[in-house]
Amino acid sequence: MNTFLDQVVESITTQDLSHTTLIFPSKRAANLCKKKLVAKLDLPVILPEFISIESFIANLAEVEIIDHTESIFQFYQAYLSVTNKDQAESFENFYSWAETLIHDFNEIDRYDINAQKLFKHLSDIKDIEHWSNAKNKSDLVKKYLKFWEQLPQYYSAFTAHLQNQSKAYQGLAYKLAKSNCTHYLEHTQNHFILIGFNALNTCEIDIFKMLLNSGNATAFWDIDAYLLQNHKSAEFIRSYNSWPYYNKTPIQPTNRSFTEAKAINIYQVSKQIGQAKAVAQILSKIPPKKLQNTALVLGDESLLQPIINALPNTIEQANITMGLHLSKSILSPFFDDLIALQLNSNEYLYHKDLLKIINHNLIKQLYPTEVSKVNKYILDQNLLQVEVAELAKKLKLSDDFYQVITLSLNTSTDVRHFLESNLGLISFLLKHNSLSKRMQFLLQEFESVFEEIQLLFSTYNFKISFKSFKSLYQSILAKKNLDFKGTADKGFQILGMLETRVLDFETIILTGINEGVLPSGKSQNSYLPFDLKLNYGLPTYTEKDNVYAYHFFRLLQRAKTAHLLFNVEAEGMQKAEQSRFVTQLEVFKQPKHTIKKYSVSADATMQVNSLQEVQKTSEMMEELNRLFNSGISPSALTTYIRNPIDFYKRYLLGVKDQNEIEEEVSYKTHGTIVHNTLEKLYENHIGKPITVKDIKEFLNIYESILTQQFSEQFDINAIKQGQNRLIFEIAKQQTKRFLHLELSMVKTQDVKLIKVESTKTKSFQLKSGQRIKLKGTVDRIDQINGKYRILDYKTGRVEPLHLKAEQDWEGFTSNYKYSKAFQVLFYTLLAEDEVSFPLNAGIISFKNLNAGFLKFQLKYNKTKGNPDISVQVLEQFKQELDQLISEILNPEIPFLEKKV
């Protein structure tokens, strides 16, 4: 295979390279080209300089390029120097807006924009946004507008502060490099070769122009003839033909391979794990000799760990270039919990905080006996708050273990003291003889993170809160990768998309080729509006899309086989559709391209397990009878209907949902809060008519009650921002819409409230003669014009179809689709003795309030049903319920797993 770098090496081997500098988009590309050139040269020669563009810019600018974290601290120093002491914000508040502003400074300088002019323009925009309050601006609005007015001053102070130290953030380095370039060229005899570039910022364009116009530079652009004509992927390279250097001879294509024969296989895969398994299948079919020229490119780098775990045995050697994020390591949750403990420190230690720390793998492996003792003691004594010294004394814990706990749980209001404790803990653990080499390595990596933060704190003597510390920690941790050992030019390659620059492979496997991933879409981290960016020539998502288009189609240029995988099941905010780049391959299919599409489920490559079956033992029967004697709920019975094995695990083995501290409002908690809010609103009206006046009063007070219910579950600040804020607003809208629904009803009908959140039990005799107990909480019982209603509130979406039962009751207690209908009839049975028939029972769905009260209906033909629940209907339900419970209590019928 004749790669782009092979072509470059072939072109330059005849030249005198002793005074030559080869400039590449990345260090990896530079190193690979160096190896190819050395292999090509026979005689001893003086090699040229191989350098990445970032290193070249730093040399040209004559500055040290600092990272993002140090930029924050340097910027705060500059900010304090131009801000009155009594008006200066704390580091914590500063940090919240400075990160984004530094990103904008970077872009402004990389594209050589007049920052003073741009920020004046931005300030004017912000002022116009508040034009309606021009005469009566509040102090808050004045402060807000003042912030935008001061941005030019912040920019000038920051850049001057850095230049005084010969330091720069990346964008500033580019700007300085451009201004130094003319002088630099006057004093160098070097020849420069620019290799494999595509999207250049304004400073790079001007520097490259100066290099080429000097007569001491040449450029190698890697672009296919077909793509160069009129394809989006070549938009940047085509634009460079306007440079004076290319007036006579425009940029020429380096190959004509894109339209040649290619096998393109497109895989529609279910879920992320499905992609990992599909990749393993594809790799297992590639002959070992061809793996040398095969690359797996991760469009979504979060797939790295699952793919590594799924690699087939045929992969003897692999080079993984991107490294595994330290934040994804098994030790990361341990230190996250230590920091969380500081953020939520109280006078007493909550038992869950202690158990979280000591039950991490790291501590459990070193002190299994002590951990077991503490777990048992806290559970047996039902301790909520723990006093560690007293606990250690009572359980006679070892000195080592006690010291680990003390260092781990050393809450302090001083961040520096916490850092010292953390480093002390790591140092203490590293001395442990039984610590595995893997754990030693990981601890040392985290030690370096905390030492880096400690160095920043000692260099910049700012007062730092734990909240700011957490942000800094996460920022530094995000940069730390655990590198894999491998050889860059040997074996099967696993890379990120940006790492493929200037590289070529015969076979490529691309994962995560979803719209919204490749390209990534309109996400941006900037204070600059889209129109302002366009006006000043700053890049927007359009340019970003073109960058990824180039990487994608360039990778396909010389490839003979391409396997493209995308996820068809949306996870989180991801779109479940293939990338537009894949669609373009299909729509503008080249005659010699063979395109095949495959649909692969996550289970397709998994071994099919037989369904689990559990026979009922005498001990199980005792537990079942105990369960039914104490009271069985409708949710327990619908769990059995859905999957008997789940019922067995939850109600006999006691395997329940893990009780975790919620950082975000869960679906279940959201439902509980709405239920409790309605209960508080209506509880003083039991046994009374509900009037228009009552509902209007509810509309005035519901928000404060809802807020109170949220605050009982979470810190009140937790609902002021982010996902929790969104869920709070949804709950507020749902409650408000429900009350308006109620208002419409009470205006035209007589409504009397009978019960709310009524917990009931009822004795129920089976045909076998055995008596069991039913239990449940009925959300609401009322009367509409004298007719009883039984209501169940659901915060999820319910459709009318979910409340319909077949006329012959077929499948009612065996098919989970009838679970909602089953529940409302169960509640009707519980309330049987305090209502009169016929009545209506059903659901209010807070995600489908437009449907109103969804009534249970017994079908009398294919589409229509009777909503009235008569005594006869309830008697039939009792028979169905009897059959279901008798099946559960039958020792001869095993718990048989269902495919769910």
Image (cartoon, grey):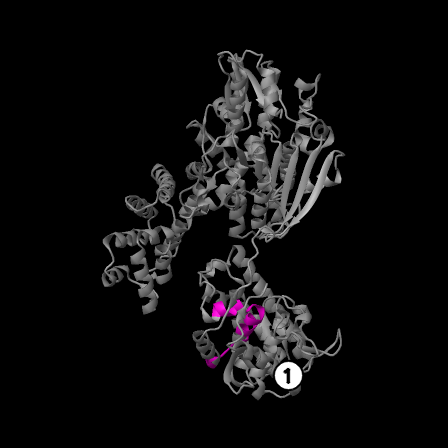
Position of residue 638 measured from the top left corner of the image (x, y, whole percent): 57, 72
Query: Could you say which is closer to the camera, residue 279 or residue 527?
Result: 279
Q: Residue at x 26, y 55 (%)?
A: 402
Residue that numbered label 1 is attached to: 876
Q: Main secondary structure of the magenta part?
A: helix
Instruction: Kindly indicate the quadrant of the structure image that contains residue 883.
Output: bottom right
Give the magenta part as a residue range. Answer: 629-650
Q: Residue at x 72, y 38 (%)?
A: 594
The C terminus lies in quadrant: bottom right
**883, above or below 118, in the image:** below
Position of residue 210 measured from the top left corner of the image (x, y, whole percent): 59, 19
Number of numbered discs overlaid on the protein picture: 1
Query: Could you say which is closer to the camera, residue 883 or residue 374?
Result: 883
- Amino acid type, mark 1: Gln
> Is residue 364 at all visible to an observer of this figure?
yes
Instruction: Kindly indicate the quadrant of the structure image that contains residue 626.
Output: bottom left
Position of residue 493 measured from the top left corner of the image (x, y, whole percent): 54, 34
Disc 1 crowd rating (10 Å Cα; few below 14, some 14-19, many 20+) is some
The N terminus lies in quadrant: top right
- Judge whether residue 647 is colored magenta: yes
Instruction: Kindly indicate the quadrant of the structure image that contains residue 552.
Output: top right
Question: What secondary structure is found at the residue carrying circle 1?
Answer: helix
Q: Residue at x 65, y 40 (%)?
A: 531
- Judge whether residue 612 is colored magenta: no
Query: Could you say which is closer to the camera, residue 299 or residue 473?
Result: 299
Position of residue 496 measured from the top left corner of the image (x, y, whole percent): 55, 37
Q: Residue at x 44, y 77 (%)?
A: 622
Task: Locate residue 389 relative to residue 800 in the image: left or right.
Answer: left
